[in-house]
Image (cartoon, helix red, strand yellow):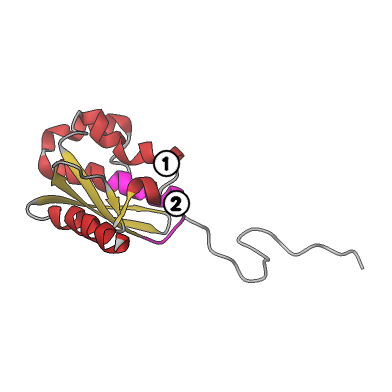
């Protein structure tokens, strides 16, 4: 019985995220986030992969997601719904942050200056360097032996 009630509450939260939204894609290392910003409603929280973001990300990374919203003063106007794949938790959080910033631009182009000044629109292109033939790793050479 308790699981059915919990499921219904979850369904209400997910089903409430319908209608018009603003879309943005964020990437970082191998993580990709597809972000939708919905108009805020009652009793709704940011959702990451159909889970509340407080359950998905550790406390140290939760602020990363909402910084574009708080910088523009829109933290109470939108609910973030994101689907994230690949990478680690830090890369996923930064991918969601870029996706939120791009979705905010889709809503209002005048926010570009504020988001650009904080660096939220810059795609961090750093990724893992490929392994080269004859080496142990990307740059690590085999141990040299005199004899």
Tag 1–tag 2 contact (CB < 8 Å): yes
Asked if residue 136 is positioned above or below residue 73 in the image, the reply reads: below
Label of residue 89 in the image: 2
User: Horizontal placement of 67 versus 42: left or right?
Assistant: right
Dominant SS type (magenta)? helix
What are the residue bounds of the magenta stretch?
A: 85-98
Q: At which x and y percent is residue 80?
A: 23, 47
Q: Which mark is residue 79?
A: none
Q: Residue at point 17% right, 41% down?
A: 78
Q: Spot the residue most to the bottom.
A: 133
| Above or below, comparing residue 137 to residue 110 in the picture | below
Residue 61, label in figure: 1
Decide: is 102 above or below 138: above
The magenta stretch spans residue 94: yes
Number of residues whose C-alpha sits closer than 10 Å to that of mark 1, classed few (under 14), some (14–19) or many (20 or more): some
Left or right of 21: which side holds 33? right
């Amino acid at each position: 019985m308790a699981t059915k009630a919990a499921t219904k509450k979850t369904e209400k939260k997910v089903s409430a995220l319908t209608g018009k939204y603003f879309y943005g894609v964020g990437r970082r290392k191998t993580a990709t986030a597809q972000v939708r910003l919905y108009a805020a409603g009652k009793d709704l929280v940011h959702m990451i992969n159909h889970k509340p973001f407080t359950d998905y990300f550790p406390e140290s990374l939760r602020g990363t997601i909402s910084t574009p919203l708080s910088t523009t003063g829109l933290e109470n106007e939108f609910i973030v719904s994101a689907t994230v794949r690949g990478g680690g938790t830090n890369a996923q959080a930064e991918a969601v942050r870029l996706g939120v910033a791009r979705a905010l631009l889709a809503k209002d182009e005048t926010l570009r200056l504020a988001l650009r000044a904080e660096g939220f629109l810059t795609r961090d292109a750093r990724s893992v360097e490929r392994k080269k033939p004859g080496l142990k790793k990307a740059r690590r050479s085999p141990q040299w032996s005199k004899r």
